[in-house]
Image: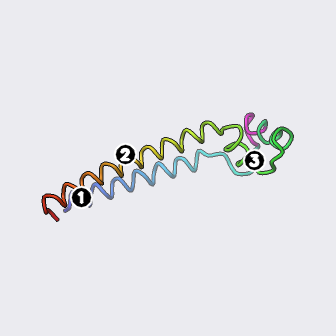
Amino acid sequence: MKIRTTVLVLTLLFLFAALLVAFLDAKPVTAPLGEVAEVYNRQTVAEIGVTNVISAINFDWRAYDTMGEATLLLTAATGVTALLRHYLHRRRETGIS
């Protein structure tokens, strides 16, 4: 029990330190946008006619990538469901609860 607690505390400390380093290294919110972000921000309304830049990037410029991610998520969920259904069916047959 003591080893588990020690590992948990060390893991939480490591994650907290990593989060702290990430926040200290991040640009301030008021910093100017990067070069690519400026291009997206400037051309979104002109090229697509959508005022929401995030939606325009996700559903127009990156639509195939978004569709691929959704397909991957659906495939993973279907696989897990199939494995669990098989496992639960075997448990019911053997009478193990």
Q: In x, y percent, where is residue 11?
A: 35, 53
For the point 30% across and 49% down, the residue is: 83
How far apart in space, not on screen, are marks 2 and 3 (Cα)? 34 Å
- For residue 32, the mark is none
Residue at screen point 27% across, 57% down: 6
According to the image, label 3 marks what residue?
53
* Residue contact between numbered discs 2 and 3, judged by CB atoms under 8 Å: no
Label 1 crowd bin: few (<14), some (14–19), many (20+), radius 10 Å: few
Looking at the image, is 82 positioned above or below residue 64?
Answer: below
Q: Give the main secondary structure, helix, strand or loop, of the magenta stretch.
A: helix
Q: Nearer the viewer, mark 3 or mark 1?
A: 3
Q: Amino acid at mark 1?
A: Arg
Q: Reading the chain from its start, which is encountered first: label 2 or label 3?
A: 3
| Crowding near the residue tagged with mark 3, few <14, some 14–19, many ≥20 C-alpha atoms within 10 Å | some
Locate the C terminus by quadrant.
bottom left
Residue 64: x %, y % from top left: 62, 36
**First of labels 1, 2 by sequence position:** 1
SS at circle 1:
helix
Between the C-alphas of marks 1 and 2, the distance is: 32 Å
Q: Which residue in the structure is indicated by mark 2?
A: 79
* Amino acid type of the residue that numbered disc 3 sits on in the rendered structure: Val
Outermost right residue = 46
The residue nearer to you, when weighing 16 against 34, is: 34
3 or 1: tag closer to the N-terminus? 1
Which label belongs to residue 4? 1
Viewer-proximal residue, 85 or 33? 85
In the image, 86: left or right of 46?
left
Query: Is residue 36 on the magenta stretch?
Result: yes
Q: Which residues are magenta?
A: 33-38
